[in-house]
């Protein structure tokens, strides 16, 4: 278990979603998008919501190694957090977790609508509005943090290894 620095936790919370990688039954990476609903910085744990019960859950049950990747292209920064995941029992999705997920989806939808208005775009389809209800909670215990920014772009006191 590795403590998650506050600046990295804050960065992750600002992202609309993260890309996680698990290992499929043939040993190949499987990538999927997930929403972060909670970060326990001191325990080094990140909680993700899975709205589908597909390959990600199967992969985690077979091989718990996982990576979580988030980047901000505009700021030219990002992080990859490596660790071990477990699919929590369905009754572990508390009302607070569901509320947090709903708030995240509402925020993403509002940002998309505002951006479309500012760019004078009209869209009848808003993907966030059609996401199914959460199916599973995935708990990730972070073991390593990798700073994806090149050394000369890192801020002083940056955490993690370089990729």
Image (cartoon, grey):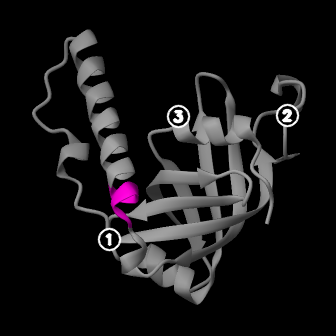
Magenta stretch containing residue 95, yes or no?
Answer: yes
Residue 81 drawn above or below residue 78: below
Is residue 40 among the parts visible in the rendering?
Answer: yes
Q: Residue at x 70, y 55 (%)?
A: 81
Which residue is the site of mark 1?
Answer: 135
User: How many circles with numbers are drawn on the protein?
Assistant: 3
Which residue is the site of mark 3?
Answer: 14
Badge 1 marks a residue whose secondary structure is loop
Residue 10 drawn above or below residue 132: above
Residue 15: percent from left, percent from top: 51, 38
Q: Which mark is residue 158?
A: 2
Q: What's the magenta region?
A: 94-98
Using the numbered discs, state the Cα–Cα distance from disc 1 to disc 3 in whole angstroms. Answer: 23 Å
Q: Is residue 136 left or right of residue 132?
A: right
Badge 3 marks a residue whose secondary structure is helix
From the image, which quarter does the N terminus lie in? bottom right
| Front residue of 56 and 94 | 94
Q: Is residue 54 left or right of residue 13?
A: left
| Front residue of 162 and 15 | 15
């Amino acid at each position: 278990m590795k403590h998650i620095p506050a600046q990295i936790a804050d960065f992750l919370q600002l992202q609309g979603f993260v890309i996680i990688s698990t290992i499929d039954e043939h040993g190949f990476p499987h990538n999927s998008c997930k929403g972060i609903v909670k970060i326990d910085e001191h325990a080094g744990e990140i909680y993700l919501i899975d709205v589908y019960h597909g390959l990600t859950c199967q992969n985690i049950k077979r091989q718990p190694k996982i990576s979580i990747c988030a980047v901000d292209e505009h700021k030219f920064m990002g992080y990859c957090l490596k660790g071990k995941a477990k699919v929590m029992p369905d009754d572990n999705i508390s009302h607070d977790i569901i509320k947090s997920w709903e708030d995240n989806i509402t925020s993403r939808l509002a940002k998309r609508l505002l951006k479309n208005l500012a760019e004078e775009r009209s869209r009848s389809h808003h993907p966030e509005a059609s996401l199914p209800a959460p199916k599973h909670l995935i708990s990730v215990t972070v073991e390593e943090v990798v700073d994806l920014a090149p050394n000369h772009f890192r801020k002083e006191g940056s955490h993690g290894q370089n990729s």
